[in-house]
Each structure stands twice: as structure tokens, then as C-alpha cells.
């Protein structure tokens, strides 16, 4: 059974990467979709969301910790990027001085993050497809 677990460990690691990148793709897409929302239900502008990953560590029979993939630890608000303020007295959300506070979402940065997340997802998918091809070849050899 240990041999089967080792055989499928690469596929499981790639699956965790795909799952984590899917969360990142969804989060970036949500950021882009809300990049012009100046008033949310909480009252202020939309706040950019960021995804945090951490490795999944498991203890091997030898006692050492080995990386078994990656998981999302949380999706949190980006408090380090400032909101954008634009003077537009005609905007319905303008303050008394005519300033409007827009989300802290930079669409160029978000598109770069989206491309990176999609490429990482595709790389993990390629790993899984390679594993399937290798397993099929191994089964043919055993026939």
C-alpha cells in the first residue's frame, strides 16, 4: 500500500496546487469585477482581497516532514494598498469636498496576478496529465 501512496503522491500534490490556484483565480476575478465599487454594504469602497497559501506538511515514516502540497490558509483584505481618491464632485458618492474614494484595486496588477494563477493552474494540470500518461504506459507494460 505504501508504494501506491508514493505513486499517487505527485498527483495529490498537483491537485492541491490546482485547488489553491482556483481560489486565487476566483479572488482576482472578484477584485477586477469590483474595481469600481465605491460603496459596499459596510459603507466604504470595495477592498482588494488577497489569498494566502501555506505548504501542507506531513510526517513521513522516517520521521521527517515532507511537503504534500499547498493549501489556502485565508482570503483577507489588503490593508497595505491605499485606496485611490479622485476629485469628482458630480459622483453620487463624493464627500463634501468633492472627493470620491475608489477601491484599492489596480486592474493591471490584478491581470498580472490572474495570468500567473492561470499559468500555475495549467502547470499543475500538465503534471497530472503526465502522471496519467505514465500510469497508462506502466499498465500497458504489465499486460
Image: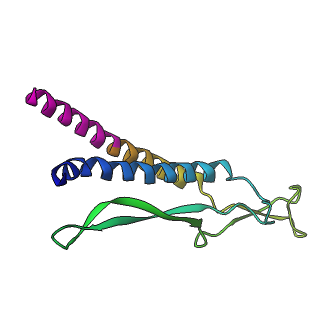
Q: Would residue 143 be found to the left or right of residue 112 on screen?
A: left
Q: How is the image coloured?
A: rainbow
Relative depth, front residue between 60 and 108: 60
Magenta highlight on residue 136 = yes
Q: Is residue 105 above or below residue 118?
A: below
Q: Residue at x 91, y 69 (%)?
A: 96
Q: Would residue 124 be found to the left or right of residue 45 on screen?
A: left
Relative depth, front residue between 41 and 11: 11
Which quadrant of the structure image shows residue 42?
Answer: bottom right
Percent across and percent down for residue 74 are 52, 65
Percent across and percent down for residue 9 are 25, 52
Which quadrant of the structure image shows residue 132?
Answer: top left
Percent across and percent down for residue 29 are 58, 48
Main secondary structure found in the magenta portion: helix
Q: Would residue 140 be found to the left or right of residue 22 on screen?
A: left
Which quadrant of the structure image shows residue 55?
Answer: bottom left
Q: Residue at x 29, y 41 (%)?
A: 128
Magenta range is 125-143
Q: Quadrant of the C terminus?
A: top left
Percent across and percent down for residue 45 are 74, 62
Amino acid at each position: 500500500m505504501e508504494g501506491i501512496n508514493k505513486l499517487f503522491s505527485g498527483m495529490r500534490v498537483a491537485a492541491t496546487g490546482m485547488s489553491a490556484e482556483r481560489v486565487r483565480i476566483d479572488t482576482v476575478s472578484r477584485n477586477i469585477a469590483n474595481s469600481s465599487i465605491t460603496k459596499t454594504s459596510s459603507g466604504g469602497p470595495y477592498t482588494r482581497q488577497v489569498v494566502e497559501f501555506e505548504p501542507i506538511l506531513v510526517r513521513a515514516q522516517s520521521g521527517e516532514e515532507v511537503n504534500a502540497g499547498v493549501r489556502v490558509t485565508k482570503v483577507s483584505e489588503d490593508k497595505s494598498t491605499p485606496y485611490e481618491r479622485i476629485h469628482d464632485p458630480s459622483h453620487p458618492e463624493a464627500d463634501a469636498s468633492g472627493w470620491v474614494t475608489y477601491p484599492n484595486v489596480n486592474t493591471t496588477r490584478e491581470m498580472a496576478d490572474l495570468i500567473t494563477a492561470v499559468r500555475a493552474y495549467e502547470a499543475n494540470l500538465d503534471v497530472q496529465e503526465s502522471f496519467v500518461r505514465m500510469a497508462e504506459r506502466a499498465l500497458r507494460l504489465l499486460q
